């Protein structure tokens, strides 16, 4: 399989991914889902440790139209971007239908409380099959958190830490968590409870970054300027390298 920016990018659609994850659950195998976007691409370029960390997932999904567009320009493959937030919601639906257990890790108490309320209201089949742990614990107690998750033995473990903390947690402990699907979800809890709206048009045009920047310019303007500038540079470099490789 050809790589994109050094990553084994998942090239199938979301429904195929969900089926694969369910098949692996049935086989008792562990899957780790990493969302590749321009931020992680930039962070990985600045640190070999982070690049290796981000590359270590069993399923590296194109979380953003820019990554899907790059795959088309470099390798000619038309693929669909897979929003991590939307994927999480679909996996929650699968859990309610199939009887899977879910552990929600990370975020403040208040937000987790709202996640729990939404599940009680919209997915009552999951009551008794969900567990929660806020993300503001002392790191010296992290082994206790790992034991708590392992005792629950979730089918889906959603890790809502910032990046790269969530990837570090997943790769450090994935063998001890007794979870079948482990996925870093960042701000997906906010999407799940309705605080964040994902407009289909901005997704199709690859402009969600612009909308988010306009909503929070002080925090995001500099970040997206650096990430997007690096992405354009990396894309041109990848296109030139691939053209030279195929010409040999």
Image (tube, helix red, strand yellow):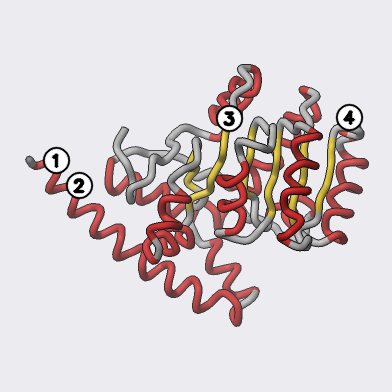
Q: Could you tell which of marks 4 and 2 lies nearer the N-terminus? A: 4
Residue tagged 2: 242
Q: Residue furthest bottom?
A: 218
Q: For the residue labelled by badge 1, is the local secondary structure a helix, a strand or a loop?
A: helix
Measured Cα–Cα span from mark 4 to mark 1: 52 Å
Label 1 neighbour load within 10 Å: few <14, some 14-19, many 20+: few
- In the rendering, at what x and y percent does residue 114 appear? 87, 54
- In the rendering, at what x and y percent does residue 107 appear? 76, 59
Mark 4 vs mark 3: in front: 4
In the image, what residue occupies the spot 35% across and 51% down?
70
Residue tagged 4: 125
Of residues 46 and 242, the one drawn nearer to the viewer in this rendering: 46
Q: In this picture, is 50 found above or below 170?
A: below
Q: Quadrant of residue 190?
A: bottom right
Which disc is residue 23 wearing? none
Q: For the residue labelled by badge 4, is the local secondary structure a helix, a strand or a loop?
A: helix
Q: In this picture, is 127 found above or below 113?
A: above
Q: Could you tell which of marks 2 and 3 lies nearer the N-terminus? A: 3
Of residues 223 and 205, the one drawn nearer to the viewer in this rendering: 223
Q: Could you tell which of marks 3 and 1 lies nearer the N-terminus? A: 3
Q: For the residue labelled by badge 3, is the local secondary structure a helix, a strand or a loop?
A: helix
Residue tagged 3: 15
Label 4 neighbour load within 10 Å: few <14, some 14-19, many 20+: some
Q: In this picture, is 23 found above or below 164?
A: above
Measured Cα–Cα span from mark 1 to mark 2: 6 Å
Is disc 1 in contact with disc 2, using a CB cutoff of under 8 Å? yes
Q: Could you tell which of marks 4 and 1 lies nearer the N-terminus? A: 4
- In the rendering, at what x and y percent does residue 149 appear? 76, 40
Residue tagged 1: 246
In the image, what residue occupies the spot 60% across and 77% down?
219
**208 to the left or right of 155:** left
């Amino acid at each position: 399989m050809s790589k994109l920016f050094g990553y084994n990018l998942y090239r199938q659609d979301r429904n195929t991914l969900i089926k694969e994850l369910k098949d692996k659950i049935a086989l008792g195998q562990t899957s780790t889902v990493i969302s590749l976007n321009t931020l992680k691409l930039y962070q990985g370029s600045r640190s070999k440790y982070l690049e290796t960390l981000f590359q270590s997932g069993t399923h590296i999904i194109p979380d953003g139209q820019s990554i899907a567009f790059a795959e088309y320009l470099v390798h000619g493959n038309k693929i669909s971007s897979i929003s991590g937030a939307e994927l999480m919601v679909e996996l929650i639906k699968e859990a309610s239908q199939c009887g899977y257990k879910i552990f929600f890790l990370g975020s403040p108490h208040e937000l987790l409380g709202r996640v729990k309320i939404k599940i009680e209201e919209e997915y009552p089949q999951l009551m008794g099959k969900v567990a929660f742990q806020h993300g503001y614990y002392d790191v010296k107690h992290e082994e206790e958190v790992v034991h708590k998750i392992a005792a629950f033995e979730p089918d889906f473990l959603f890790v809502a830490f910032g990046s790269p903390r969530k990837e570090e947690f997943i790769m450090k402990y994935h063998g001890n968590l007794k979870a079948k699907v482990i996925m870093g979800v960042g701000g997906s809890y906010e999407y799940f409870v309705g605080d964040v709206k994902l407009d289909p048009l901005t997704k199709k045009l690859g402009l969600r970054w612009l909308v988010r920047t306009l909503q929070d310019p002080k925090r995001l303007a500099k970040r997206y300027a650096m990430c997007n500038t690096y992405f354009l540079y990396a894309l041109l470099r990848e296109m030139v390298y691939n053209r030279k490789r195929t010409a040999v």
